Image (spheres, grey):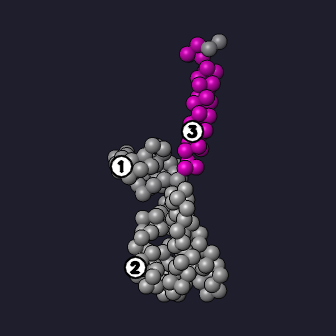
């Protein structure tokens, strides 16, 4: 009944392998990827640190998996090749937190213009800078030690809350 030459045995094997691949890819696709971007390298959970991101980028480049993933919408890639806006904002704040905080004290700077662009209101960077300067102590309020790993998310959510309270920025920004 289950000989290797039997077509029903092959169908059973194919079904099991397909279900296994779908369940593994579904569980891995829920995890966000790092600075190396989407692709096969983003599917390895152990590669979330800085060195791992180098390995992920090398894997994506060497195997052309990033190009394939963007084209096909697999390997943590979207079919349009665009990173989700909220993820791009979070990554930006994570890697630019200190300089962004310093610029916020002045109310102007390159990073304020960049975050304005990421929030969908690049022409309103001056207004956003003024808002961030005015609400600096709220936006960059020190967090508890256990929250330090999600500090960028907290900063971003506080900023978006203040944008929502501002009538002009609420309409201009598409966050």
Magenta stretch?
A: 3-31
Residue 64 relative to residue 25: left or right: left
| Quarter location, residue 84 | bottom right
State whether the magenta stretch is mostly helix, strand or loop. helix
Q: Earlier in the sequence, mark 1 or mark 2?
A: 1
Q: Would residue 164 be seen by someone viewing this image from the given angle? A: yes
Q: CA distance from mark 3 to mark 2?
A: 41 Å
89 or 105, nearer to the observer: 105
Looking at the rendered structure, the secondary structure element under dot 1 is: helix
Q: Position of residue 160 (x, y in %)?
A: 59, 74
Instruction: From the image, tell me which residue sits under label 1.
Output: 51
Can you tell which mark lies on residue 110?
2
Residue 25 lies within the magenta run = yes
Can you tell which mark lies on residue 24?
3
Q: CA distance from mark 1 to mark 3?
A: 24 Å
> Which residue is painted at 62% across and 14% down in the image?
2
9 or 166, nearer to the observer: 166
> Which residue is painted at 52% across and 79% down in the image?
136
Label 2 Cα neighbours within 10 Å, binned few <14 / some 14-19 / many ≥20: few
Image position of 1 with respect to 171: above or below? above
Q: In front of the other: label 3 or label 2? A: 2
Q: Earlier in the sequence, mark 1 or mark 3?
A: 3
Q: In front of the other: label 1 or label 3? A: 1
Q: Quadrant of the N terminus?
A: top right
Q: Position of residue 74 (x, y in %)?
A: 52, 49
Q: Position of residue 167 (x, y in %)?
A: 65, 86
Q: Position of residue 9 (x, y in %)?
A: 61, 20
15 or 91, nearer to the observer: 91
């Amino acid at each position: 009944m289950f000989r290797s030459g039997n077509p029903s045995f092959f169908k059973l094997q194919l079904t099991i392998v397909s279900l296994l691949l779908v369940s593994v890819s579904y569980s891995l696709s829920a995890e966000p990827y790092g600075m190396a971007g989407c692709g096969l390298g983003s599917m390895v959970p152990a590669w979330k640190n800085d060195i791992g991101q180098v390995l992920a980028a090398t894997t994506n480049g060497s195997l052309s998996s990033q190009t394939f993933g963007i084209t096909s919408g697999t390997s943590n890639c979207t079919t349009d090749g665009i990173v989700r806006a909220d993820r791009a904002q979070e990554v930006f704040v994570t890697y630019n937190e200190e300089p962004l905080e310093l610029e916020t004290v002045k109310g102007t700077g390159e990073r304020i213009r960049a975050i304005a662009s990421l929030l969908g209101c690049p022409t309103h960077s001056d207004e956003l800078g003024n808002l961030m300067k005015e609400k600096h102590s709220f936006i960059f309020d020190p967090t508890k030690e256990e929250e330090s790993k999600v500090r960028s998310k907290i900063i971003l959510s506080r900023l978006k809350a203040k944008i929502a309270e501002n009538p002009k920025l609420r309409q201009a920004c598409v966050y």
